[in-house]
Amino acid sequence: MKPRLLIVDDDEEIRTQMKWALAKDYDISLAEDRASAVGVFSEQRPPIVLLDLGLPPHPGTPEEGLAALPEMLALDRFAKIIIISGQGEKTNALQAIGAGAYDFLTKPVEVEELKVILKRTFHVAGLERDYRELQAQMQADTFEGLLGTSPQMQRVFNSIRKVATTNAPVLILGESGTGKEMAGLAIHRRSARKEGPFVAINCSAIPETLLESELFGHEKGSFTGAHVQRKGRIESASGGTLFLDEIGEIPLQLQVKLLRFLQEQRIERVGGRQEIQVDTRVVAATNVDLKKAITDGKFREDLYYRLAVVVISLPPLRDREGDVRLLAQEFLRRNAAANGREGIGFGLEAVKSLLAHSWPGNVRELENRVKRAVIMAEGKRLTAADLELESPVAAALSLNLKDAREAAERDVINRALRKHAGKIAPAAAEIGISRPTLYELMEKLGIARAEREGKPTGPEEAAAE
């Protein structure tokens, strides 16, 4: 489809000559006066306009052309309007440039010169349009700092929107590096508590002997080293949100005290006897199986159900369709700007290695690899080696025939299971084998059954991506 060009000139012969000269490359629209020019522009929105200043009813003066210019720019401020000026009208043309015109040409116009200028102008307009679309996409794809276009992440965003408007406790599940704290912060920012504090604590990073004091605070002299009274994290988060990361690491004796706080919204500092009323919402997170911890006697069942009023599961990066490239480009943009390396990009081999990697460290691993590559790379195009990832070409060459066959079988089975939500019968039919044969292949390849979850699992699941 040819790009659209509007030519505005009161001289019919000039309009005809320009149309015939440019019709091969552009979809031409014509107008002879201000009213018809603005009308055509409003209806068709051409990205480029050639505008003569001398238009009827006063073709000898520039008023009509100078009036048409802002009217068209008001309809589309990104349009490129090129002024066509007579020899004696350069002052007027410069006035038009000051009013937003893109360029000006002096009559008589040389056709070859005009073609070069139009080609360049359409190229610039295309680049600007692509940039605006990219910026709009980045804004649309970003949700309170979380980035993702995959259906998996869109479901997470929808859950956050719904739960943020309540005061219900939330439990966020996900592997290390999936962004659990960012999800907790998104809940806080979307809530009525957004003006209050967001207090985060990693329960696994604090020794058991100090964790109670850290959470509940202590009175002066309650233990050796307690020289002053101190508020705990729960009290400090009153009016806002307390984010308890690695909640599964809290010792059992402290779980009882935490449960009482969740039930009554009251706390006692270590060494204190006075109950303190607090208004703190709790968002907890973990990367361990709390239900298994309950079975093993390491986590209280009643505390679990107090925390897990709403559960949000963050998908691992390997399961987020299309998000690896999106995140990689954003991390590249940020780090290139921060390190003065604008213009750096991913080479084709690097892109393939990013898509082939299983990302056990999830988004955190991706961000660290890109950051390191931007700093250490010598060229303008990042390679798989810069990212410290294996080249997919080298990986393919390293496979023997047995490995290659198993990789292909695993890929086909995982795709069929994913397509049919983990259901064995339709997946077997899709592949063209019997159910028993599919069971045997799954067992041989280490693909676990996961019909309830609706997706295959296993150590090689990422190969299907």
Image: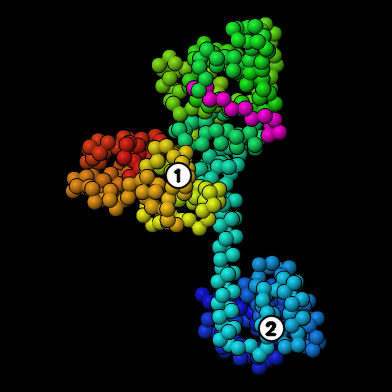
Task: State the residue in front, 365 or 426.
Answer: 365
Identify which residue is drawn at 72% across, 87% down.
86
Labels 2 and 1: the sequence-earlier one: 2
Q: How many marks?
A: 2
Identify which residue is drawn at 42% across, 56% down.
379
Identify which residue is drawn at 56% across, 86% down.
112
Snapshot colouring: rainbow
Identify which residue is drawn at 50% across, 17% down.
207
* Residue 77, image x, y percentages: 69, 67
Kindly indicate the quadrant of the structure image that contains residue 134. Answer: bottom right
Dot label at residue 141: none
Segment tinted magenta in the rendering:
193-204
Q: CA distance from mark 2 to mark 1?
A: 52 Å
Element at badge 1? helix
Dot label at residue 84: 2
In the depicted structure, whether residue 92 falls above or below residue 462: below
In the depicted structure, whether residue 165 falls above or below residue 272: below
Crowd tier of the residue under label 2, counting other residues whose Cα lies within 10 Å: few below 14, some 14–19, many 20 or above = many
Q: Are marks 2 and 1 in contact (CB under 8 Å)?
A: no
Q: Is residue 429 visible?
A: no
Crowd tier of the residue under label 1, counting other residues whose Cα lies within 10 Å: few below 14, some 14–19, many 20 or above = some
User: Is 383 included in the stretch rendered in magenta?
Assistant: no
In the visual, does 158 lie left or right of 69? Answer: left
Q: Nearer the viewer, mark 2 or mark 1?
A: 1
Task: State the residue in front, 152 or 387.
Answer: 387
Q: Is residue 442 visible?
A: yes
- Look at mark 1 in the image and give the residue it sits on: 372
* Residue 386, image x, y percentages: 39, 48
* Residue 294, image x, y percentages: 44, 18
